[in-house]
Image: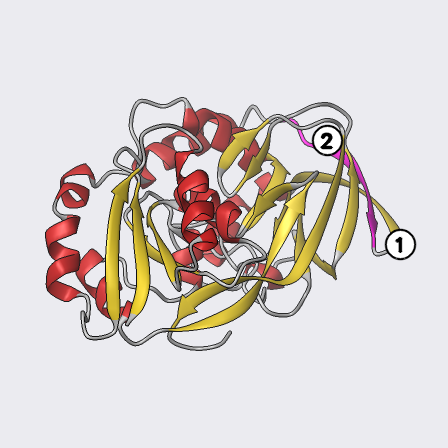
Amino acid sequence: MKNIAFIINPISGTQQNAKRKLPKLIDKELDRSQWLPNIVFTEYAGHGRELARQFATMGFDAVVAVGGDGTVNEIAQGLRDTNTALGVIPVGSGNGFARHLHIPMTPARAIQMLNHSEPICCDYGLANDKMFVSTCGTGFDALVADDFAGAGKRGFATYFQNAIKDVFSYTPETYELTCDGVQVTKKAFLITFANANQWGYDAYIAPLASIQDGLMDICIMSSSAILGAPGLALRLFTKSINNSLFMDTIKAKDVILHRESNAPFHIDGDPVDMPQDIHIRIVPEGLKVLAEKRF
């Protein structure tokens, strides 16, 4: 028997009703011959990280984040550099990390997948010591994330509406990057630092990114990207944006980013305050995750 904890964020995403039913669903779908479950709900911001760290200290085999990318990030913070594996039941909005791991978007099937999963070692990232598991970045996508966080509704429709609202008024900035010692200066529409391959909603900003290569994909979208917006949008959802003339991708493990201003910055889709200079790096094999296959 292996000990597994389920940490449920009751307010993330759009599936509040589904989350209330999750304890019964876990009891029904989880293989009790191999897993001994413990189910808890978070009560305040940061509670998930505290609970995850407690379960890891107690020697639990796995802790499952039940929520969206923000919840996954918070639970991962409590599990990084431990022997306790992170599982995911995606009931958030974008669910980018779960999609990278090919975890089903329906709770019942995601629980069933846990019965056939095994712990694998994967990388995570740090941006000025703030952890990210999927992506972080600055520019247009960070501005949309900032607006999305303040919106009254969640979901793709709200995200899309904010993107349309901001796209024609956004002014690109010039960025200086030092990527593994190599200096690059670019005027960019956005820059995404990708450990995993997508933002969420199956929008693949870094189709070739791997969570097991010890590197990040630095995705730099040209300042003139607005000219190719329809094509870029299509490429995002067909895993081909890396082939666009408006996109440059650099692989590196350590980056210093200098920005012209303290503009919006996001970590796993959530806005955070950051200074103009940001140190971004990959921590190889610092997090265990439950998955059905290696990536």
State the residue at coordinates (31%, 30%). 43
Instruction: Report the amino acid beneath label 2.
Output: Glu
Mark 2 vs mark 1: give the one in front. 1
Q: Tell me if I can see residue 167 in this picture.
A: no
Image quarter of residue 103:
bottom left
Say which mark, if any, is on residue 181.
1
Q: Position of residue 293 (x, y in %)?
A: 42, 77
Quick check: 50 above or below 133? above
Residue 197 as seen in the image, left or right of residue 161: right
Q: Nearer the viewer, residue 125 or 244?
A: 125
Return the disc, 2 or 1, that comes first in the chain's sequence: 2
Circle 2/circle 1 CB separation < 8 Å: no
| Towards the viewer: 143 or 49 | 49
- Amino acid of disc 1: Gly
- The stretch in magenta equals 171-179
Please give the residue where the numbered disc 2 appears in the rendered image: 173
Q: Residues within 10 Å of mark 2 (few under 14, many from 20)?
A: some
SS for callout 2: strand
Q: Secondary structure at mark 1?
A: loop
Please identify the quadrant where the N terminus is shown: bottom left
Is 264 placed above or below 14 here? above
The image shows residue 295 at horizontal and vertical percentages of: 51, 74
Q: Which percent across, then down, holds residue 251? A: 72, 61
Q: State the image coordinates of residue 268 (x, y, percent, origin top left).
A: 51, 43
